[in-house]
Amino acid sequence: MTPLDDVDRAFTHLEQIEAPPDLAGRVMRRVHSRVRLWVMLDVAAVLLLGLVSVSLGMELHASGWLELLAIAFAPADVGVESGELLEVLVGTLPWLQVVLLLGGAAAVALLSTRAFAGPELA
């Protein structure tokens, strides 16, 4: 048998204690409240993403961007050069809504992962 080192000697002096009787219940309530928070944040992010999506659709319609996109996919005999059309498409795209939509999608993905992955991430 090997001699005891300092850590082993320290462990021999420790006393075993009893866990509080309601420990499991307290831990489960806390985990449940955190999961509920992540789900509520996820629902809020989905609602905001829906609003941004509607706003993007309205801006695309109002700016005529959808008609320009239809011209871009029309047969080649329309008479519009692709370089000019691409420049107009990029110039008229509502970039604020596009960035907000991408950020909202990333937030929904993150919050959904946190909300539905289980208590170890909450």
Image: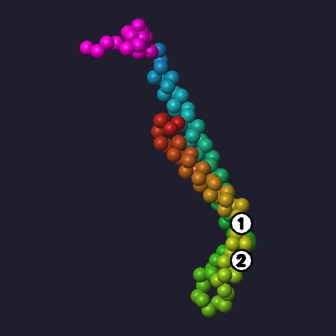
Helix, strand or loop at label 1? It is loop
Q: Which part of the image, by quadrant, shows the N terminus?
A: top left
Instruction: Tell me where residue 38 appears, x and y as whole percent.
Output: 57, 40
* Colour scheme of the picture: rainbow
Q: Are marks 1 and 2 in contact (CB under 8 Å)?
A: no
Instruction: Tell me where residue 77 appears, x and y as whole percent.
Output: 62, 92
Looking at the rendered structure, the kind of residue marked 1 is Pro
The prevailing secondary structure element of the residues shown in magenta is loop
Answer with the quarter of the image where residue 100 lies. Answer: bottom right
Helix, strand or loop at label 2? It is helix
Q: Which residue is mark 1?
A: 94
What residue span does the magenta drawing correspond to? 1-19
Q: CA distance from mark 1 to mark 2?
A: 12 Å
Q: Which residue is mark 2?
A: 88
Looking at the rendered structure, the kind of residue marked 2 is Val
Q: Which mark is residue 71?
A: none
Q: Residues within 10 Å of mark 2 (few under 14, many from 20)?
A: few
What residue is rendered at 70% in x and 77% in y?
87
